[in-house]
Image: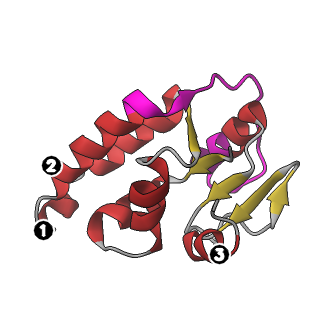
Amino acid sequence: MQKIVIDTNVMVSALIQRSYPYRIFYDLFIDEKIILCVSDELMAEYYEVLSREKFAKFPNFFARAEALLVDIESKSVKYFPTIKLDLISDADDNMILELADECSANFVITGNTTDFTFPSYKQTKIVTPREYWENYQPD
């Protein structure tokens, strides 16, 4: 089964609109067709970002975020990265690569093409939600 690391921006998108990020979370992760890999640091970022007041304008955003976080807490696999990287200018995004390295992720899914400017890191492909859905999702 594919091991996936999902950047926070993809989770936000999944909660706002029903497009590729939504399908990845609800058609693949919730149905246990992929393994979502997380770390304490990534979970802290998920909670912090999803609680931002600016998302209150989206109907039921906080209730849906809370439900998704409960699923992530119960269904994902937690890793504890031991390396520290400094490859991305936005320091917070290095934790995504650290986690991918630790869990030997097949994919990092991110909408952040500004900071993730390279196609892969070691064995991990770095793709957008659309690229993942159209080219790599499991059968």
* 25 falls in the magenta region: no
Q: Quadrant of residue 90?
A: bottom right
Label 1 secondary element: helix
Is 42 or 109 nearer to us in this picture? 109
Write the residue at 34% across / 49% down: 49
* Quadrant where the image shows the C terminus: bottom right
Mark 1: which amino acid? Lys
Q: Residue furthest right?
A: 122
Stretch of the chain drawn in magenta: 73-96
Q: CA distance from mark 2 to mark 1?
A: 13 Å
How many marks the image carries: the answer is: 3
* Quadrant where the image shows the N terminus: top right
Is 57 or 128 nearer to us in this picture? 128
Label 3 secondary element: helix
Residue on which disc 2 sits: 63
Horizontal side of 111 relative to 52 (left or right) equals right
10 Å crowding of disc 3: few (<14), some (14-19), many (20+):
few
Cβ atoms at labels 3 and 1 below 8 Å apart? no
Mark 2: which amino acid? Ala
Residue 111 x, y percent position in the rendering: 55, 69
Any mark on residue 131, and which?
3
Sequence order check, earlier mark of 3 and 1 = 1
Horizontal side of 34 relative to 103 (left or right) equals left
Any mark on residue 57, and which?
1
Sequence order check, earlier mark of 2 and 1 = 1
From the viewer's perspective, is the residue at label 2 or at label 1 nearer?
A: 2
* 95 falls in the magenta region: yes
Label 2 secondary element: helix
